[in-house]
Amino acid sequence: MPRYDYRCKRCGATEEVTHGFHDDGDVECLGCEAPMGKTFTDINIAPSATPSRSPDGIDMAATKAAEKAKVADMGAYRRLRADGVQPPAINGSAKLEAKAETSHEVESGHTFSTASSRKRSMGLVKDMVDDK
């Protein structure tokens, strides 16, 4: 049932009252027993309850694809974490899991396009670590 805020017309006291949409709402003040009237305060509306602003409505194909990607990313994220590596985010973890060959690639969130670039970069990282 919805909750409504009521304010006393005589003393100004406020009270939250729960009643149905079609109920009268004849509420009396608990302090002075004068009639109370509905007031409007901050209203919170969930984004899921509002219609899409797109003129075409909701793109269900894109929504389903995003949900499918989210499920794949969460599974990959959990597997990577179980292997002891920390991806930078859940989003994109499935792509990292499929393409990354080293833990450094997973943790940085960037994969190398070629084996030679991977070898060169890993050599630089090794040199930097060895210098310390």
Image: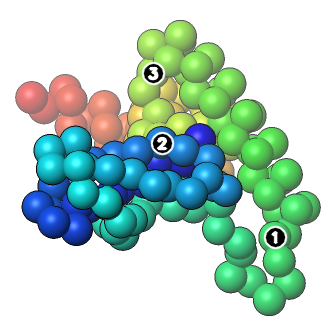
- Residue at 68% in and 24% down: 75
Q: What is the secondary structure assignment of the residue under circle 2?
A: strand
Nearer-N-terminus badge (2/1): 2
* Side (left or right) of 29 relative to 111: left
Q: Nearer the viewer, residue 27 or 44?
A: 27
Check contact, mark 1 vs mark 3: CB within 8 A.
no
How crowded pointer 1 is (Cα within 10 Å; few <14, some 14-19, many 20+) is rated as: few
Q: Quadrant of residue 91?
A: top right
Residue on which disc 2 sits? 18
What type is the residue that disc 2 sits on?
Thr
Label 3 Cα neighbours within 10 Å, binned few <14 / some 14-19 / many ≥20 = some
- Is 34 positioned to the left or the right of 71 in the image? left
**Callout 1: SS:** loop
| Residue 105 at least partly seen | no
Q: Residue at x 69, y 41 (%)?
A: 70
Task: Specify the quadrant that holds the C terminus.
Answer: top left
Question: Which residue lies most toward the right here?
Answer: 61
Residue designated by label 1 = 58
Q: CA distance from mark 2 to mark 1?
A: 33 Å
Position of residue 14 measured from the top left corner of the image (x, y, whole percent) = 22, 54
Residue type at mark 3: give it. Val
Measured along the vertical axis of the image, is residue 33 above or below residue 12?
above
**Residue 6 found in image quarter:** bottom left
Image disc number at residue 85: 3
Residue 23 pos. (x, y %): 61, 52
